[in-house]
Each structure stands twice: as C-alpha cells, then as structure tokens.
Amino acid sequence: MADYTPIIKELEMKRVAFKNKPYPKPPTTRDITRWTELLRDDDSSLRQLSASRSSIRRRARELSFSIARELGKEVLFLVLSHLDQRKLSFLDKRTFTDALSKWWSKVQHPDVLAAVASKSLTLSGPGRVDCASRGRGSAEPISAGQKALATFGVSICLS
C-alpha cells in the first residue's frame, strides 16, 4: 500500500492556511489553465493527444472527479492546488481517496475553504466543471470570508 503521508501533510498545511490570516496566495494563471484543461477534457479532446499524454490526463481527470464525488469540492480544490496531472495520474484512486477520507474525517473544515471551493467549482453532470454563479457589484459590506472569495473565487473559477 502506498504511503500518502507526505501528500496529506502538504494538504493539511494548505487547509490550515485557510483558518489563518492572511489567506493563502491565489492560484497562478498557469494553475488555472492546468485545472481548466484537466477538468474540461472529454474523450474527444483526449483523442487529439498522444496515447501517453491522453492516458495521464484521463487518469488524473477520473481521480479528480472521484475525489469531488466522494469527499467534496474542498478536498478537490486542495489536491488540484498541490498536485500536477502527472502526479495525480500515478496515484491509485481507491487507496488515495481512502487516505484522503481518513484525514478529512479527522480535521475541521474551514468555512473560508468551503466557501471558496463551493463558489469556484460546481460539478454539473458527469465529467463537467463549470463556474458557480456569483454576484457582482454588491454594495453591501463584505466579511473576511467574502474577501477571500473575492481573492480566490474569481481567480480559480473554471468558466
């Protein structure tokens, strides 16, 4: 059985960062592009890639959707912000999601992380990730959590 302790430790550091201020840096443009391509891939787009690249992307995409289904958007957000497609593709779906599940069940789920993940990633139908609807131009005062959403939500929205 693979040891996912180093990955879980990194994800834990990211999770804890959402409990503290200042909030973590928003993802880079490169990250956004990488996530968008991975989560929007379909069989048609994968056929245009080489066999090895297609295999990597398919396995990474399947693991990503498995994590989202079984553990939620918060965990998917943390995983995608830490692991690239190649690393994702080499992880065993069952044992990795089991390890994530054990960790996630023992820790608190920061409200800001939940809000960022919920606002940013909406799974709609098999194999699709779209932006959640989000209001713009509100004149109401905003909380610290909403400031984090403004920082992260727009940055990682996969439209």
Image (cartoon, rainbow, N blue to C red):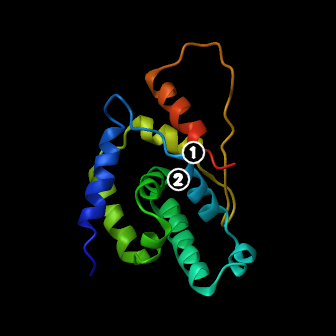
Q: Is residue 137 above or below residue 124?
A: above
Q: Which residue in the structure is indicated by mark 2?
A: 31
Q: Residue 3 occupies which quadrant of the picture?
A: bottom left
Crowding at label 2, few (<14), some or many (≥20) Cα neighbours within 10 Å?
Answer: some
- How many residues crowd mark 1 within 10 Å: few (<14), some (14–19), many (20+)? many
Q: Secondary structure at mark 2?
A: helix
Q: Please state the horizontal and vertical placement of residue 150, each as a whole percent of the image.
A: 55, 30
Q: Residue 95 appears at what percent x and percent y?
A: 35, 75
Residue 58, x across and y down, in percent: 58, 76
Instruction: Kindly check if marks 2 and 1 are in contact, taking CB atoms under 8 A apart as contact.
Output: yes
Residue 86 point in image, percent of width and height:
47, 72
Q: Nearer the viewer, residue 57 or 139?
A: 57
Does label 2 or label 1 sit earlier along the sequence? 2
Q: Is residue 20 above or below residue 137?
A: below
At a point 58% along the width and 79% down the height, the residue shown is 53
Residue at figure coordinates x 66%, y 34% from the top left:
134
User: What amino acid does circle 1 point to?
Assistant: Ile
- Would residue 17 be found to the left or right of residue 51 on screen? left
* Quarter of the image where one finds residue 42: bottom right
Q: Residue furthest right?
A: 44
- Closer mark to the observer between disc 2 and disc 1: 2
**SS of the residue under disc 1:** helix
The residue labelled by disc 1 is 156
4 sits to left or right of 140: left
Cα–Cα span, label 2 and label 1: 8 Å
Q: Which residue is rendered at x = 50% and y = 52% of the image?
A: 73
Which residue shows up at 49% across the image and 45% down it? 27
